[in-house]
Amino acid sequence: LGMGAAFVGKAKHGSLRMGALKSAPEPISLIVSVTIKEDRLTDFLKVIEEDAVGSRERENGGCYRFDVIQVAGTTNKFVFYEVYRDDEAVKFHKAAPHFALWRQFKESGGVLEQEVVKGKGIFYGSKIP
């Protein structure tokens, strides 16, 4: 394979493993951990559902995944697992109306803590388009 060639190998169970050489942009993964103010949980659940559904359904295929997970044994700690086609898809997401709802919720003091880890895809358990 030349330097501009792509390598995507089939792994067990039909999932994709991202190879070292690619011509296509690498998917961007975000793992976002948040602690929500207890008295804002109802608002949070409405906002994050709109952001997650909007991301998956209204971003022209740029958002491959947006999962919202509540941390076991807690009422106000959550993790979001997001996968985007590339950096341009992340920029598009941050400019979308559903993301503006999330930004407004944060600015209103609903989020006590937030940590974001950005990564690149090495192996995905489901097929990425």
Image (cartoon, grey):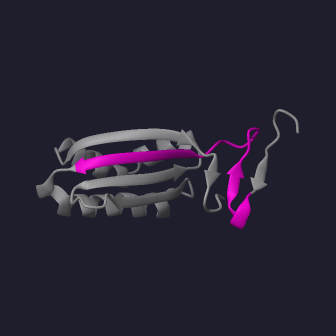
Residue 77, compared with residue 91, is above or below; it is below
Asked which quadrant contains residue 114, the reply is top left
Q: Quadrant of the C terminus?
A: bottom right
Is residue 68 or residue 102 the one in the foreground? 68
Q: Quadrant of the N terminus?
A: top right
Q: Is residue 113 magenta?
A: no
Residue 71, compared with residue 108, is above or below; it is below
Residue 89 in percent (x, y) is at 53, 46
Residue positioned most to the right:
1
Asked which quadrant contains residue 21, the reply is top right
Q: Is residue 58 visible to us here? A: no
Q: Is residue 57 visible to us here? A: yes
Question: What residue sits 41% from the left and 64% below the top?
Answer: 53
Is residue 107 or residue 80 the one in the foreground? 80
Question: What residue sits 17% from the left and 45% below the top?
Answer: 108
Residue 57 in percent (x, y) is at 48, 64
Q: Is residue 21 magenta?
A: yes
What residue range appears in magenta?
11-35
Q: How many marks?
A: 0
Residue 77 in percent (x, y) is at 26, 53
Q: In the shown orientation, is residue 36 left or right of residue 39? A: right
Q: In the shown orientation, is residue 111 left or right of residue 83? A: left
Asked which quadrant contains residue 113, the reply is top left
Is residue 70 or residue 46 the one in the foreground? 70
Residue positioned most to the bottom:
13
